[in-house]
Image (cartoon, grey):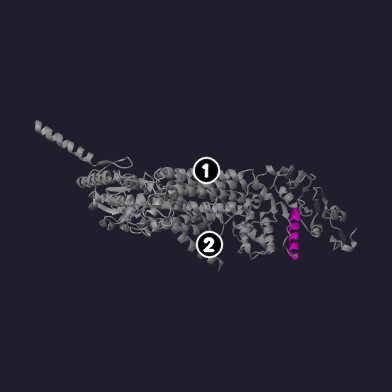
Amino acid sequence: MSRAACAIALVLSLIPAAAVAERCVEDDAGATVCLDAPAERIVALSPGAAELLFAAGAGDRVVAAVSHADYPPEAEALPRVGSYDRLDMEAILAQRPDLVVGWISGNPTNQLERLDALDVPLYRSEPRDLPDIPATLERLGRLAGTAEEAASAAADFRAELDELAATYADREPVRVFYQIWAEPVMTVNDEQIISASIRVCGGENVFGDLERLTPRLDREAVLAADPEAIVSGGMGEADDSWLDAWRRYESLQAVQAGNLFFVPPSTLQRPTPRVLTGTAELCRKLEQARR
Amino acid sequence: MRRLVPPLAVLAAAAIAALAVAVGIGSVPIPPAALWAVATGGGEPLHQTLVLELRAPRALAALAVGGLLAVAGALMQVLLRNPLADPYVLGLSGGAAVGALAAMLLGLGAALVSGAAFAGALLSTVLVFGLAHGTGSWTPTRLLLTGVVVASGWGALVTFMLAVGPTRQLPGMLYWLMGDLAYARSPWWALAALGVAVAGAVPLGRSLNILARGPLQAAVLGVAVRPLEWGIYVAASLLTAVAVTTAGSIGFVGLVVPHMLRLVLGNDQRLILPAAALAGGALLTLADVLARTLIAPEQLPVGVITAMLGVPLFLYLLHRSRG
Amino acid sequence: MAESLATEALVVDIPGRADGQPLDLAVRPGQVWGVLGPNGAGKTTLLHTLAGLRPARSGTVSLADKPLPYWRRKALARRLGVVFQERHDGFPATVLETALIGRHPYLAPWDMETAEDVALARRALARLELGGLEERLVGTLSGGERQRLSLATVLAQEPGIWLADEPTNHLDLRHQVAVMDLLAAQAVAGCGVCLCLHDINLAARWCSHILLLYPDGKACWGPADAMLVTEALEDLYGQPLVAAEADGARVFVPASRASHKP
């Protein structure tokens, strides 16, 4: 055997190993997920996972999703496999998925364990901070064989995020109360990804130090914290009625200055690339509050 | 003995039919020929997985849990001589719920949630046993009162955990409290417990009939009242603990199935106990089929269906029995 | 059936009451004992103690010279039957089922009642004029019918010793007589019978022996003739009485106000 042939054989023998290595990623539960071939039949077990898969360029490989997977519009046409908190195991298996993207804190633990037991390849997702979003895009892209598109989407995200941060993060701090629910009043602490958006915009979550991820508050606590701006979502994408409830507390700085802001909840509360849209809007609103 | 066979045969047929329906129906349609192929050891891998890994274990778990709850309910009603008693009346499901929810809050896996539920149920049993035993005097009223108060205590803890639990975990916790066979992992423990319980309880049936007429009457007719009462208590508690551990606290079956059977079959425990095992199992199995398929792919908690099926059935039987 | 129920220095445990007089008596085959006493004298408690349903404070109760605690509960149940004053009917049951529970002491756990058991229960029901009511639910019976059903259950139990707590409660006069006749017939057939009674005249008519229980724990007992004397009964009930003889039996009626002694 010539040296050239040897070299070729060596290279050839390395290719499968390299190919295998390329299909292995670590998920948010710390487990290594490996696929023999790019995933072609993907089931998304949360609306956010569906959105991330589409953003990673794997949209045409997603064969089913849970209910309320409504973005991008193509996702709405997907077959459903139950809701994120009660999965229809039969419907999932019937799709013969070669990759399932689960949601650690949203899907029932026992059902995810059952998928593991049935040898269904499972990527457990749980982005906790803004930089986790492009990282997830890259990993999903690697599993779905759309690494290039995913890498470019991730790069776009990082660039846009850096730009927002460069513009707003060091501006004069605005003390913000972010309301995720009205009855009872609920907010988020600094661990929650919404607070990351607030930080990028140079805001400061007045309840960031609280122990729980989504603390329940009484109204007095909000009055005592006296935020400079109140930001909320609502029951729908254009429902700002929750803010009205605050208007009668005229002692609040936010009310005096007219800094009651509505940001459509799905753009800020879902850990997907669209969070930049919401974050940009939040940054503009907080900038308004600085005037 | 001849008197017992026809109703039990009918109920056994119903239970088998319910199992067949549960294995045959799901959110994915499988044609009968394919089902037969799986049953005979062949068939497509997907169909094998659906039938053998998902449907069959879940159907058997439903059968076992329904049977366990109905038998435990019938036993509790005799023990407390109170028709309103159910398997949960002495606080057992509360203890199990506290265990299960605490495990969920700690983010533990399904096996540990089950283990914690079983531990909670046993803790509650021992607690009520100890407190009701107290100074040595023991009456159904005292046991019932102790159980109800302990149950309220558990209820407060459950509410506390729901209040402080992370929002995203709330659905899972609520579904557990409503009872959900999606938690069922392996049916074998529950089936074995049910078999042992029925085999053990039927010979005691006549003694139970007499115990239902009061401890003095029972003692004078040769029933060892105290050992029998504690035996029932421990047995009913263990059965309930196994059921709750398998599928969360499914309501209604344990309260109403024994009463439905009494309306139709009379009150001979030798008949009622095995009949409850079969009827409770069949009812829960069918209810779970509906829970899985009614608004598929969305899934309903099975407790909703047991009540929706059971309430009209019970009211019909009650109405008929009066007329 | 030649077994006697005997007490030896028996002190009944009535909570919050000082020890009464120890009882040494024997209910022998062929005897009908009547226990008389005012409300609260402890008649029911005594009956339950005699049945081994509650422990004595001291002394023993023996059946066939063997103390009750040494008897196996089931063996005892074949020899000793109790008609209770209070009943818990629990879940709905038919008249026949209720009479059949009397056969429980004779059946092993796996046994079902035999045709013989059912025939025995039906005979017992017929004996108490409950024939034809076999399939009725117990809850639909009148008080008197329910009382007779209790007796039918014990009749089906075929004990050698009968203990009955006010067996004539709720019964009209004809049925009172029928029940007393039935119990007396049991004694004639070789059973020992012990009854708590409120009616002195029923006791006088049917009982061979009498136990007088006083509220202060005092007691006396013996053959009916010796015990049923006006002074003792007046003392027992705190009520002036007048005695008369009618149809060969002694009869006691409350004295009229005019004859009250000052």
Q: Main secondary structure of the magenta part?
A: helix
The x, y position of residue B102, in whole percent, is 45, 44
Q: Amino acid at mark 1?
A: Leu
**Subunit of mark 1?**
B
Disc 2 secondary structure class: helix
> Is residue B39 in sight in this rendering?
no
The x, y position of residue C94, in whole percent, is 61, 61
Q: Which residue is mark 2?
A: B264
CB-based contact (under 8 Å), mark 2 and mark 1: no
The x, y position of residue B263, in whole percent, is 54, 61
- Residue interval drawn in magenta: C173-196
Q: Could you say which disc has been placed on residue B123 in the image? A: 1
Disc 1 secondary structure class: helix
Query: Per the image, is B180 magenta?
Result: no
The x, y position of residue B177, in whole percent, is 46, 51
Q: Nearer the viewer, residue A182 or C11?
A: A182
The count of marks equals: 2
